[in-house]
Image (spheres, grey):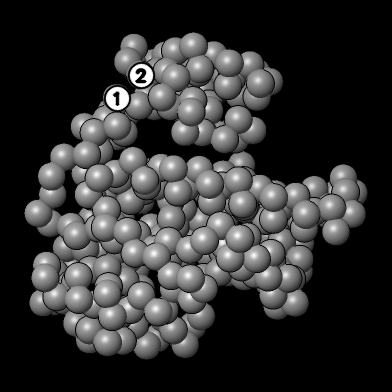
Amino acid sequence: MARRLGDVELVSADSMQVYRGMDIGTAKPSPAEQAEIPHHVIDVTDPSDDFNVARFQEAAAGAIAGIEARGHRALVVGGTGLYVQAVVDGLAMPGDWPDLKAELEAEPVEELHRRLGALDPLAASRIEPGNARRLVRALEVTLGSGRPFSSFGPGLGAYPATARFRLAGVWLPRPVLAERIAARYRAQLDAGFLHEVDRLSEVMSRTARQALGYRELLEHLTGGCTLEEAIDAAVRRTREFARRQRAWFRRDPRITWLGAAHNPVDLLPSLLGDWSLS
């Protein structure tokens, strides 16, 4: 789309492409691609950092303002639902309660999920039960602020009309998506994914370690499973994430959905036509 439109710069809304060095496993655009089309909110911090949505929101807002100041248009791409909604809807970011966070981090992940389900069922339904980092954050905010984590900004369940952003979703049949996920992991391993994880393993923050594929290969490198077991777990977890990702975006009535049988590039004419109306 950027090549065809000419006046477009890309803004990544991927929560893990922000990390320098996490290139293969996040399918980060290549140096050649980044040289051809300006990309933003990529490589903004080290993998030792616990990056969060508030910092992303600030970085994305700055990038979009700069793009518009140059007379260009921003195309926000990526699949981290909360990051996309933070930009589109300007979600109000809650504060921090470090002492409470430290207490919660000592609790088993199952207990975290149970407590969040009792206090904020909506937030609990949108967080992977094994994602301790996000569960801790949701409980930290819920307990610290005295209001549900899901209620901040207009609320995760609110979709106010927006004139600034035009939203489009690309849909693929589930069997096709499942095949693409498995094939991508094999291609990433062939490109040196395991070496990348090994090189970064000593410096990755708790947040970075949760990245799809990285968590499983880290377990393999510490002797917790075979490589094939790690790959199977990563593929399975990514497919589960894709289902939750689809459910997240399907709730937003502002998104125009376009489906392709096999190759999403087939949707380019429709996407370009939709863009021309904005």
Residue at 36% over, 46% down: 250
Proximity of marks 1 and 2: CB atoms separated by less than 8 Å: yes
Q: Is residue 63 visible?
A: yes
Q: Quadrant of residue 253?
A: top left
- Percent of width and height locating residue 119: 44, 12
Query: Would residue 175 be found to the left or right of residue 79 on screen?
Result: right
Q: Quadrant of residue 277?
A: bottom left
Q: Amino acid at mark 1?
A: Ser
Residue at the extreme front: 261
Q: Residues within 10 Å of mark 1 (few under 14, many from 20)?
A: some
Q: Is residue 209 visible?
A: no
Q: Is residue 84 above or below residue 11?
A: above
- Percent of width and height locating residue 6: 22, 86
Q: Total number of numbered labels? A: 2
- Percent of width and height locating residue 201: 72, 55
Location of the C terminus by quadrant is bottom left
Residue at 35% over, 19% down: 148
Q: Is residue 95 above or below residue 88?
A: above
- Percent of width and height locating residue 91: 25, 38
Residue at 42% over, 18% down: 120
Query: Would residue 224 be found to the left or right of residue 106 on screen?
Result: right
Q: Which residue bears the numbered disc 2?
A: 148
Q: Is residue 66 above or below residue 126?
A: below
Mark 2 element type: loop
Query: What's the mark number on residue 151?
Result: 1
